[in-house]
Amino acid sequence: MKTLLSIVTLGVLAVSTQVSAAVHTISLKKVDETPEATLQRYANTGSYIAQKYFGANTIDQLDTLQQQVVPLNADGSASFGVPISNFMNAQYYGEIEIGSPAQTFKVVFDTGSSNLWVPSAECSSIACFFHTKYDHSQSSSYKANGTDFSIRYGSGSLEGYLSQDTLNVGGIQIDGQQFAEATKEPGLTFAFGRFDGILGLGYDTISVLGVVPPFYHMVNKKLVDEPVFSFYLTDTNKDSGDGEMVLGGYNKDHFEGELQWANVRRKGYWEVDLEKVSFGDDEIKLDNTGAAIDTGSSLLVVPTTLAELINKKIGAKKNFAGQYTVECSTVPSLPPFTLQFGGKNYKLDAEDYILNVQGQCISGFMGMDIPEPLGPIWIIGDVFLRKFYSVYDLGKNRNLEERDMSTIRASNIAKGFGGQYIVECSTFSKLPQFTLQLGGKDYTLDAEDYILNIQGICLSGFTGVGVSESGSSIWIIGNVFLRKFYSVFDLGKNGIGFAKAL
């Protein structure tokens, strides 16, 4: 039985009215792949994400792109509303039908985006030859629209146009659903994707061209009992059968205990406040950080610095394919990793966050930095969702979280992952200045200079190293200081000059 995570949006909680519609269940299949293919899929996670969401000119830039999830604007910022799911790396799919007579497609049910699209019979891209294509000329219920449609990806744009036809999802029929026929799918990553298309379950606020998402139609037309859907993702390593998505409710047979809810912080993704994380006895309290609960991603995508610290802590080493691997024999001794949403703690044991693929153990933590205003945001994928049943409540705008755990905080500064010192970001204004005197002159650093804010995690700029000789000592003054003070190094006069940088 699973404990669970539920999701809802911000707003007044209302009493729901029962209607004659039913609860509908869709079976979710996990990709049938060889161990070699599984390892390759995990190895390519960064490439898949970059291919789909990062606005690069060429795929040759992937070494840099792997540090990013979404397209950046010219000023280096990231816009809110772009799809965040690494769906080409997803493991679970279901079937939908479009048209009359029905044409069947395998799709990812994706909480990280909001549009429905499938390949068009008019598509001539290599990727389209590997997937089922929609032929509107064979559907009597098709209605032309023709509005140009595009989503920007790493090596170009997925392009096509809008059409309208009958959609059937798990026995729920939606007449006149608008969706995109993709006539151009860029890059080989789409060709190797296991799915034909995507059915987005995010908020309508991020839907391209303002197209009404299918689940909104189900709610508005009272085709489901409640404005709720839920996911149960199985672990094939444990031979637990197919997963399922329930439209209009949830299945109590797939979890234990009571649902715990957390409010959605921004209507777009199913994003909640990530309040703190802990790894064993180490804890970090986070400031203004989101967590997108994403059924279209496989791993836990966290800030790069933190991913490196965690992977170092668990003894993971990067292999030739760029994956972090650990000795399988060490897994039982590794500490739990806990995330807190809505004041509730959700604990992942090592067997949850370490992926065992035919005797090879891979870390489920992947590092990527997502800049403002979209970030800082973590992407919480299937590593988490296999352990926690998740419920998404569109009517009440909330997310579900889980158990309580005692707070370890002893002061505003605590030793964090990898031995680094972590500061609560909210204490900045209360911290004192730090002044060094060099050559008879004072050089003052404010807290914002000596505290490093990395994706909402605030690290102390001070580290202790014993360096001494003959009773004397030496301090090493690095970029924490040099970012504030312009420095001149004079080899002729053997001196260093400083002035406040502009």
Image (cartoon, rainbow, N blue to C red):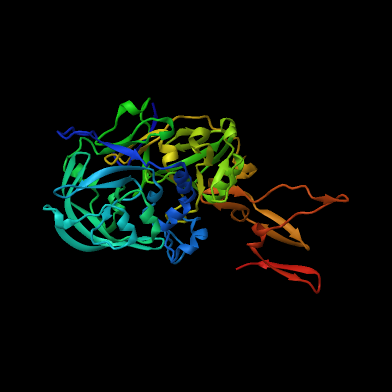
Residue drawn at 32 percent across, 54 percent down: 130
The quarter of the picture where the C terminus appears is bottom right
The quarter of the picture where the N terminus appears is top left
70 or 423, which is in the foreground?
70
Q: Relative to residue 190, is residue 105 drawn left or right?
A: left
Q: Is residue 321 above or below residue 487?
A: above
Residue 180 lies in quadrant: bottom left
- Which x, y percent locates residue 490? 76, 72
- Which x, y percent locates residue 22? 19, 33
Residue 416 visible here: no
401 or 328, which is in the foreground?
328
Residue 332 lies in quadrant: top right
Q: Is residue 495 above or below residue 204?
A: below
Q: Relative to residue 231, is residue 432 drawn left or right?
A: right
Q: Relative to residue 464, is residue 170 drawn left or right?
A: left
- Total marks shown come to 0
Residue drawn at 61 percent across, 40 percent down: 315
Residue at the bottom extreme of this rendering: 492
Residue drawn at 50 percent across, 30 percent down: 405
- Which x, y percent locates residue 247? 25, 37
342 or 308, which is in the foreground?
308
Q: Relative to residue 311, is residue 257 drawn left or right?
A: left
Residue 360 visible here: yes
Residue at the left extreme of this rendering: 140
Residue drawn at 61 percent across, 56 percent down: 449
- Which x, y percent locates residue 63? 52, 59
